[in-house]
Structures are given as C-alpha cells and as structure tokens.
Image (tube, grey):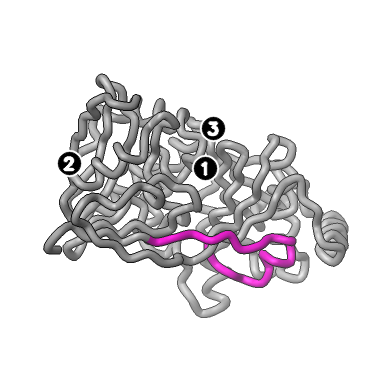
C-alpha cells in the first residue's frame, strides 16, 4: 500500500456500512466483539447523545479502517465508551500507521481515546503535524492464559462447589440463548440489591441495548450464555463474548439465596472449560480488580489512554 492515496471519509451515519464493517472486522486479528457492529450499532441506538463522526479509511474503494466516534463536551470519544471494556478502531493488517495518523488529522477535533490495548494502531500512530497529546494508563483488564493452570485452592474450591451443587439438585451448566436475558437481569439485580446497589442493568438504556444486541451477537457466533437450573428454574447465569480465541466475561448473576453453593464459581469454571474446548487462548475478566478474579490465577494487563489535541484546541 506504500505510496497509494488513501481516501478519508467522515460519516455521520453507519447506514449501508454493516457488510463492509463485518468484512473488515474479520480481517483485523485484534478486533474484539466490542468493535463488532452487533455490539456497537445497538449501543449507539440507545446512547445517541452528540453527533456521530465515523472515520472510514479506504484504499481503491475497499474499507481498510473504521473508527466510530461521537462528540461529547467538545471532544470525540469511541462508540461504546463507558459500557465497553476494550475500545478501539478496526484496521486491515496492511494499513500503514501513517494512514491512521492522516485519518485522525482529518477529524480536526480533540480525541479522547482510552481503554486501548497494547499494540493498538491508535496508540502507535504518529502524532499528526502540529497536534499535541497526553498519554497515560486506563483501568487494567484482568485475564488468564488458556489452557488454565488453576491455583490449588481454586481447583479445590471448584470441585467442592460442583459436588455441593450436584447434591442440591442443580443441573449441569447449559448453553442458553438470548431468551434468558430477563432471568439474567433479575439475578444480577437481586445480587446487587443485596449489596444495596442497583447494578448496571438497572439503566433502561443498557437493558434495551442488550435486548437488541444479544440476538445479533448470537447470529454472529460471538455470544455465549451459560445457565444453571434448579428444578427447571435458572439460579445462575453468565454472559460471555467469545471471538478470535478470547473469551470475555461480561456480566453474571446468581440467586443470593444460594450463595453458599458457590454457583458463580461453578459457572465461571464451566465458562473457562468451554473456552478451552473451543480453542480459546485467553479468558478475560475485563475491567475491575475484584479479588475473586485473581483467585483464578488471572493477572492485570494494562490498557492505555491517548488524548489528542489539534492545533489551537
């Protein structure tokens, strides 16, 4: 691609882009479910504040880079900001850093890019001429390499809780579909209310977003919903996104009346085993440094922030 003229488009609407978006998503080995149209288009439908500024980079008509942004308080942020744990654009492996830098310059507005993985082109692209920047760390994600080598105590706890669940009559974990969303919401909400907190699914916009996104994620093969039942009733559920050998534990819930059974541990253990069965290489607990994540043997992985300012801004 060296020497070719890259066409830069800045769009206000993704209409007509979905097929190209998916094609580019599949070409980008680092793109996660959080950059897929199944995740972001429903998100933008509910979190619609500010004008959209969608950066599209094309080479001879072919979409090579895509970064959906929206304007808030005088700056541009990525779609998914605030509710997604990993933010980024999607880029063809042949796209050059200089082309990314040129695209950012064409936006001409301050950019607040955060939750970027190490190696992201948005992190590595050269600062456009005359621009200034601030760099820093964002909240780390917590992940473990698969196949998992569980710490001894966790392996023992997992076996113990599985036996207790079996003796209580809890059925083996099952793969479920989007139709269990209401049960997941109820379990998640009950769990957080027991701590006198509402939980993220209490926001009606978040719930409407997931109600639309789950069928799209399912159709794309990215969704893994797991459930445990007692006498036919769901008592624990887990929402996982799986793509490109990375399983991301997004949200879960269990009936607090059965807390002593360790159903959360049982279901996370099942999700890890299923990710291994599907040849996953990473189980990602995402943001938040809750102690239970480290008991699985997971460790922090850094994410980064880059704030870009055009001349005079």
Residue lying at the far top of the rendered structure: 60
Contact (Cβ within 8 Å) of mark 2 with mark 1 = no
Q: CA distance from mark 2 to mark 1?
A: 33 Å
Residue 297 in picture, x, y percent from top left: 74, 61
Q: Quadrant of the C terminus?
A: bottom left
Regarding mark 3 in the picture, which secondary structure is present there?
Answer: loop
Regarding mark 2 in the picture, which secondary structure is present there?
Answer: loop
Question: Is 175 in the magenta?
Answer: no
Is residue 158 or residue 130 the one in the foreground?
A: 130
As drawn, the label of residue 287 is: none
Closer to the camera: disc 1 or disc 3? 3
As drawn, the label of residue 12 is: 2
Q: Quadrant of the N terminus?
A: top left
Q: CA distance from mark 1 to mark 3?
A: 16 Å
Regarding mark 1 in the picture, which secondary structure is present there?
Answer: helix
Q: Please tell me which of labels 2 and 1 falls first in the chain.
A: 2
- Determine if residue 168 is in view: no
Residue numbers of the magenta segment: 287-305
For label 1, the residue is: 179
Q: Is residue 71 above or below residue 242?
A: below
Which residue is drawn at the image coordinates 53% and 61% (left, top)? 302
Q: Is residue 140 above or below residue 88?
A: below
Which residue is drawn at the image coordinates 48% and 76% (left, top)? 197
Is residue 203 or residue 75 the one in the foreground?
A: 75
Q: Residues within 10 Å of mark 2 (few under 14, many from 20)?
A: some
As drawn, the label of residue 221 is: 3
Residue lying at the far bottom of the rendered structure: 196
**Direction from residue 309 to residue 140 in the image, left or right:** right
């Amino acid at each position: 691609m060296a020497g070719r003229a890259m066409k830069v488009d800045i769009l206000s609407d993704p209409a007509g882009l979905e097929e190209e978006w998916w094609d580019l998503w599949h070409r980008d080995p680092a793109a996660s479910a959080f950059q897929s149209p199944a995740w972001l288009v429903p998100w933008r439908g509910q979190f619609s504040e500010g004008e959209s500024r969608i950066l599209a980079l094309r080479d001879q008509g072919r979409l090579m880079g895509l970064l959906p942004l929206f304007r808030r308080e005088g700056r541009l942020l990525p779609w998914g900001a605030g509710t997604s744990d990993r933010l980024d654009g999607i880029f063809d492996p042949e796209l050059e850093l200089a082309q990314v830098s040129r695209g950012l310059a064409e936006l001409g507005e301050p950019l607040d890019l955060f939750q970027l993985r190490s190696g992201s082109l948005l992190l590595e692209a050269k600062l456009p001429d005359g621009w200034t920047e601030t760099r820093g760390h964002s909240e780390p994600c917590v992940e473990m390499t698969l196949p998992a080598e569980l710490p001894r105590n966790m392996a023992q706890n997992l076996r113990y809780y599985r036996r207790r669940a079996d003796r209580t009559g809890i059925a083996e974990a099952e793969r479920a579909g989007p139709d269990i969303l209401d049960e997941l919401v109820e379990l998640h909400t009950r769990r957080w209310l027991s701590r006198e907190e509402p939980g993220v699914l209490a926001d009606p916009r978040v719930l409407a977003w997931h109600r639309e996104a789950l069928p799209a994620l399912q159709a794309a093969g990215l969704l893994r919903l797991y459930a445990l039942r007692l006498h036919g009733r769901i008592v624990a559920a887990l929402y996982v996104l799986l793509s490109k050998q990375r399983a991301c534990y997004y949200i879960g819930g269990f009936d607090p009346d059965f807390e002593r059974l360790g159903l959360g541990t049982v279901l996370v253990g099942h999700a890890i085993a299923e990710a291994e069965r599907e040849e996953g290489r990473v189980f990602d607990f995402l943001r938040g440094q809750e102690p239970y994540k480290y008991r699985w043997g997971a460790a922090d992985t850094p994410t980064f922030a880059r704030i870009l300012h055009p001349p005079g801004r």
